[in-house]
Image (cartoon, helix red, strand yellow):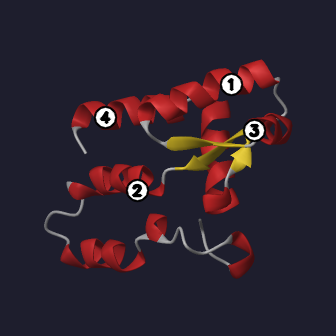
Amino acid sequence: MEERQARSSFAALSQETRLGIVRTLVVAGPVGMAAGAIAEKMGVSPSNVSFHLKELERTGLITQRRESRSIVYSASYDALADLVKFLMEDCCVGHASVRASLNEQNPCRVASSTPAEGGNG
């Protein structure tokens, strides 16, 4: 991940509603959630959530797909993993045990698990 993309992603996540949306979508897993359900869960209007969803999609942190008449949003686990790797890259230089631990855990790449199975996304 380039620094410019990381800055854009962190800027998007620095807003309370957007961070909440991403966290909600991570829990929802690959199935995702319809925009209306996200708005209800976040306690904001549909137009407000739409504004935030567009910004998160622009940064690549979430994706959308059409299902019938609904637009369903999902967390982009690869983008989130890349963001975490970008953040940890320099801090782990000279600390091989920390880097190895991160590679073993790789929490953002468990997208095949569902919340009911105990996975993180």
- Give me the C-alpha separation between circle 4 and circle 1: 22 Å
- Give me the C-alpha separation between circle 1 and circle 3: 13 Å
Residue 99 in sight from this viewpoint: yes
Please tell me which of labels 3 and 4 falls first in the chain: 4
Q: Position of residue 2 (x, y in %)?
A: 22, 39
Q: Which residue is mark 4?
A: 5
- Give me the C-alpha separation between circle 1 and circle 2: 22 Å
Q: Position of residue 113 (x, y in %)?
A: 60, 75
69 on left or right of 106? right
Which of the two marks, 3 or 2, is nearer to us in this view? Answer: 3
Which of the two marks, 2 or 4, is nearer to us in this view? Answer: 2
Q: Which residue is mark 1?
A: 50
Residue 14 in sight from this viewpoint: no
Label 2 packing within 10 angstroms: few (<14), some (14-19), many (20+):
some
Q: Which residue is mark 3?
A: 70
Q: Quadrant of the N terminus?
A: top left
Please tell me which of labels 1 and 3 falls first in the chain: 1
60 on left or right of 7? right
Q: Which residue is mark 2?
A: 78
